[in-house]
Image (cartoon, rainbow, N blue to C red):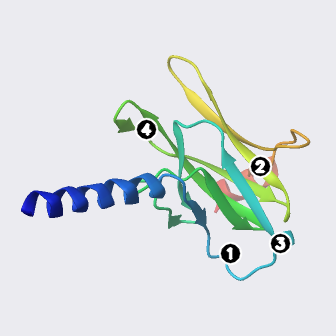
């Protein structure tokens, strides 16, 4: 009798863990918004996990999400790569997402380095925001040296 209860409990727990691998992550920027204001990022490289979105930690450690839903606009993503049972340090990227579009999370790697891309699934266009480097002009540098 007790073995039946234990086996049922284990079966229910395994079923729950199986379902959590299929869930999606919905960022707070997408909550309550219509579909045309929500962008979807699909995880095509299974070794990658989005660790943080706009400094909000996702639940990548609890379940392997395969789909992330975010509100349209700019977001800062922090992505980790799984190598065996370990995770690498996260790499951050700012992306500009359009509502109603689906993007893919793709990994690029070699033996010594790795990187990721977020691209529109239909057009192949990158969602990465290229931020200009902040530099000072020579006249500003001279003024700072004099002061």
Q: Viewer-proximal residue, 137 or 46?
A: 46
- Position of the C terminus, as image quadrant, is bottom right
Residue 62 rendering spot, x and y as whole percentages: 39, 57
Labels 1 and 3: the sequence-earlier one: 1
Q: Residue at x 34, y 35 (%)?
A: 85
| Quadrant of residue 3 within the rendered picture | bottom left
- Residue highlighted by disc 3: 37
Residue 63 visible within the image: yes
Residue 9 rendering spot, x and y as whole percentages: 23, 62
- Residue highlighted by disc 1: 29
Pointer 4 and pointer 3: residues touching (CB < 8 Å)? no
Residue 41 vertical placement versus 88 (above, below): below
Q: Residue furthest top?
A: 111
Labels 4 and 3: the sequence-earlier one: 3
Q: Residue at x 74, y 52 (%)?
A: 134
Q: Residue furthest bottom?
A: 32
Q: Is residue 114 left or right of residue 11?
A: right
């Amino acid at each position: 009798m007790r073995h039946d209860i234990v086996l049922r409990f284990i079966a229910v727990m395994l079923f729950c863990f199986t379902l959590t691998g299929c869930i999606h992550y919905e960022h707070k920027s997408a909550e309550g918004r219509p579909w045309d204001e929500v962008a979807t990022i699909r995880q095509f490289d299974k070794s990658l996990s989005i660790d943080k979105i706009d400094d909000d930690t996702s639940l990548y450690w609890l379940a392997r999400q395969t789909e992330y839903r975010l509100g349209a606009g700019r977001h800062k993503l922090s992505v980790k790569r799984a190598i065996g049972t370990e995770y690498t340090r996260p790499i951050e990227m700012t992306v500009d997402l359009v509502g109603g579009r689906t993007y893919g999370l793709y990994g690029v790697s070699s033996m010594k380095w790795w990187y990721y891309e977020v691209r529109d699934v239909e057009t192949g266009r990158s969602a990465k925001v290229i931020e200009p480097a902040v530099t000072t002009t020579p006249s500003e540098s001279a003024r700072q040296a004099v002061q």
